[in-house]
Amino acid sequence: MFEGLSLTHMLFFLVIILLLFGAKRLPEIGGALGKSIGEFKKSMRDMQNEVNAPPPPPSAPRADQTTQPPPATSQPSVREMPKNG
């Protein structure tokens, strides 16, 4: 990841960061950055597990799921009712 950066480059970046944020804020920033990276890695691991997981077996139809049409009724539907007025 840091193949092109020498020790001098990294020290220069650390000095710039120290000047921008100050010595008191650096531990806070480091802790927040560490937590963010940890959460990102956990999310990536969860996504990989979800993608690589075998598909669930097909479930049998439930008893309340019928493929029969509803029974015919003698009452007219809303479309068939005459309009008053």
Image (cartoon, rainbow, N blue to C red):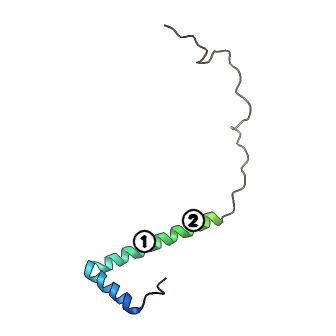
For this rendering, which residue is in front, 68 or 1? 1
Marks 2 and 1, how far apart in space? Answer: 16 Å
State whether residue 40 is above or below residue 6.
above
- Residue 51 location, x and y as percent? 63, 64
Q: Please say whether residue 67 is visible from this viewpoint.
A: yes
State whether residue 12 is above or below residue 55.
below
Residue reaching furthest to the top: 85
Which residue is label 1 attached to? 36
Position of 70 with respect to 10 (left or right) is right
- Proximity of marks 2 and 1: CB atoms separated by less than 8 Å: no
Nearest to N terminus: mark 2 or mark 1: 1
- Residue 50 location, x and y as percent? 61, 63
Which residue is label 2 attached to? 47
Q: Please say whether residue 24 is visible from this viewpoint.
A: no
Residue occupying the point 58% across, 13% down: 81
For this rendering, which residue is in front, 29 or 10? 10
Number of residues whose C-alpha sits closer than 10 Å to that of mark 1, classed few (under 14), some (14–19) or many (20 or more): few
Position of 43 with respect to 25 (left or right) is right
Residue reaching furthest to the bottom: 7
Q: Say the numbered circle drawn on residue 6.
A: none
Callout 1: SS: helix
Position of 44 with respect to 8 (left or right) is right
Give amino acid for label 2.
Answer: Met
- Residue 83 location, x and y as percent? 53, 11
Number of residues whose C-alpha sits closer than 10 Å to that of mark 2, classed few (under 14), some (14–19) or many (20 or more): few
For this rendering, which residue is in front, 82 or 15? 15
Callout 2: SS: helix
Give amino acid for label 1.
Answer: Ser
Residue occupying the point 46% across, 85% down: 2
- Please count the marks in the image: 2
Position of 43 with respect to 8 (left or right) is right
